[in-house]
Structure formats: C-alpha cells, structure tokens
Image: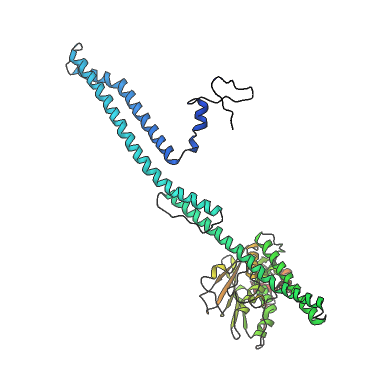
Amino acid sequence: MSPRVTGGERPGAGSRRLGSVGGPGWSRARWSWGSQSLATRLMVALLAVLVASIVTAAVVAALLGPPIFHEHLIRAGHPADSPELGHIEEAFRDSSLTSLGIALVVALGCASVVAWYLSGRLQAPLGALTRAAREVSRGHYDRRVAVTGASRELDTLAEAFNTMAARLEQVEDTRRQLLSDLAHEMRTPVATVRAYSEGLQDGVVGWDDHVAAVLLDQSDRLGRLAEDLDDVSRAEEGRIPLDLRPCRVADLVWAAADAARAAYQLKGVNLVVDAGPAAGTTVSVDPQRFGQIGANLLGNALRHTPAGGTVTVAAAPVDAEVAIDVRDNGDGIAAEQLPHVFERFYRGDTARDREHGGSGIGLTISKAVADALGGSLTAASRGLGHGATFTVTLPTLPARPATPASADAGTTAQAGLATDAAIETARPTGPPTERPAEPSDPQEMR
C-alpha cells in the first residue's frame, strides 16, 4: 500500500508526495478517458460539443449583436441620446442571454436523451459480444451472439464472431474425434500384440508361423497408421516432397487403372477407363504422388461399389486444366456427410473397421497432394444409392511431343498405388478391358 501522509507529517526522502484532492495527481489517478464506459464518453462528447456551440453563439451574439441592433435603431429614427434607446438595447441583451440559456438547457436535455438512446443501442450488442467472447475463451465454443441490426458495423462484427466461434467449435470437435479415432485405430492391434505376448509369456501360446504372422501384421498395421499420420501432417503443412516432371494424362490414368484392375476382378466390379478426350494432354506432376491419389480414389470406389457395379475413370481437358473423374454407381454419399469426406479419420459408416472402411485419411492425403500439385480434389454425389464422383483437376502444359519422363509414369504410379493396402478382395469377374494401343507418332496424341 502507498504510505499514508497525515497533516504535520513530513514524508521521507524515499516517499512520493500524493496529489491533493482535485489536483493534477488526483485527476490522473481517478480519471482516464479510455477507462470510461461508452455511454459516459458519448455523453461527455455531446455535451462538450453543445457547450462549445452555445458559448460560441453567445460570444458572437455579444460582440456583434448589440452594435448591429444599435445601428438599426438609429436608422429607424431613434435619437442617439434618447433614454428609450438604452432600455431597448438592454432588453435585447437580456432576451438574447435568456434565449441562449434556455437553448442550452434544452440542448443539454436533448443531448442526454440521444446519448442514452445511442449508448443503449451500442452497449447491448457489445455487452453480449463481450460475454460471448469470455465464454469462448473458457472453452464454450457453442456460444453465439444475435445480429440485432443496431448498425451495419456491429452486425458485421457479430457475424464474424459467430463464424469464428463455429470454426473453433468445428476444430475442437475434429480434435476430439481425432483423439477418439486414434485410440480406436490403435486399440485393436495393441490389444492383439498384448494378448499374444501374454500368451507367449505364460506358455499358453507357442511360437509358430501363425503367431509370427499375426504379430507382424499388427506391427505393420501400427506402422501404416504412423506413416499415414505423418503423410497427413506433411501434406497439410505443405511439406510434401515432389519430383515434378511432364507426363501424359492418358499414361497416368491407365497406370492407376492397371494397378487396381486385379482387385476389381477379384471383387467382380467393372473398371472402365475413358482417357480419349485427354489424349495428348500433358501435365507437370510427381507420378508417384499422382499414383497415390489414384490408389486412394480407386480403392475408395471399390470399397463402396458392390459386385457387378461399375467404376469409370474418365479424363477430359477443361479450359487450361484437365479433369480426371472417378465415378461409381455404388453406395453414394449423404448430403450431410459430403462436406466432411476430406476430413481426417472421417468414415461415413462408423461401424466399419479399418480393414473394411479404410483408415479414413486416404482422401485427406489425396486432397492435400492435389493441392500441392497446383490442382484440386472435389467430391459430388446425388445421395445414398446414387454413387459418387471424385474429380481431380490439374493445370495442363502447352502441347508438345511427349518426353521420355512420361514413359516411366506407369512404374512410378504403381509404386504409389502399392502404398494403399486397404483394397478388399472378393469373387472374380470376367477378363479385364484391354488397354487401347497408343499412336506410334507422338504428333497424333496432340
């Protein structure tokens, strides 16, 4: 506490003299313009303007009014030494001062009412916004503020706050879901490894090829999960290493289809490739990363298309880009699920496990890779039972003869496809569709 100085007591050399009540020190300690409420500041501002206006009017009237009034009286025929002239001028001064005084009082009253009304209109939404901000800072991300229409600026502020709170709520929900999904994804392999380890330790289970295969499979599963998480992290942070080279779109599409065709045969799903419209179109991509996109999209289409269904891979140029569609006539995507298909660990059917529903991050990685390649990945569906379409768009290069780099697109794309191990197998179907022969002259591909 500050030392108390009483009358007759002399403060020591190290003490600080307090300002007297009403002095400069007191005013600085007790009054701060920025610490006052909006209503107080608005009232003081209006009163200051009014007082300044009235004082200015009074000074101007006192300086200019009497001489002008006196001049008009002389012109009207009143003698300069007439006693009536003094009474008339005195009456003019008194009436002017009285009028200004009454005007000041009325103006102050009106200013008070206006200031009270405006401050109320402003304080109510600002107070609500302040309370909501405090709640959000405490982790209550479901708080929202009403758009009251008090002013366009306040409405814009309220809408921006609601958007921010909704985004924070979504991020928090994603974080919780991420932790829950991570625990779920790790629970099964960890429990399996622990059970076999305890069985080996107790002598209940003997070491054989089956036990070794199970432990190796579960270890690989945990390893794939760690690699997927690392891929997602690097993809979302823009740290994906890319080996860009010019490649023909037809080669990329056919390489992805060829790598997945065996799995489609086993399940009995038809795989159709239509790359004709994009013949001769060249893009600058990392073939292995594009193969990763193709593997994820074709694997996802295979999981959601029943036996006898059809998955079509089509490529066609659109302005300065090329659009590669992966269409299926399988399960489809519900409208409420469509905005979330690219979120980490999101699976439309939460009842399916990793082997049947996928890890839930393949599409996330694919979208991040497509963005890193300068393109995009979007999803569309007319609803459940109507299939889905995933579209990859990539910027095209000017038409030119194919380079040798495109020749190894198939090999590198298949290497990328091998990274996705979530493709189901089922009963076989008929022979695969043969790949059409490419024109021998590169000029024909233009």
Outermost residue toward the left in this view: 77
Instruction: Let me know if residue 219 appears in the view.
Output: yes
- Work out which quarter of the rendered image holds the C terminus and state it: bottom right
Q: Position of residue 177 (x, y in %)?
A: 61, 66
- Reply above or below: 267 against 405: below
Q: Residue at x 42, y 48 (%)?
A: 124
- Reply above or below: 395 against 70: below
Instruction: Let me know if residue 396 appears in the view.
Output: no
Q: Position of residue 6 (x, y in %)?
A: 55, 23
Outermost residue toward the top in this view: 81
Describe residue 131's horizontal placement relative to residue 342 as left or right: left
Q: Observer-nearest residue: 303 or 244?
A: 303
Residue 187, located in which quarter of the rendered image?
Answer: bottom right
- Work out which quarter of the rendered image holds the N terminus and state it: top right
Q: Position of residue 247 (x, y in %)?
A: 68, 69
Residue 230, located in which quarter of the rendered image?
Answer: bottom right
Q: Observer-nearest residue: 157 or 17?
A: 17
Q: Residue at x 35, y 30 (%)?
A: 53
Q: How is the image coloured?
A: rainbow
Describe residue 94's horizontal placement relative to residue 208 as left or right: left
The number of discs equals 0
Q: Observer-nearest residue: 404 or 218?
A: 218
- Reply above or below: 101 against 361: above
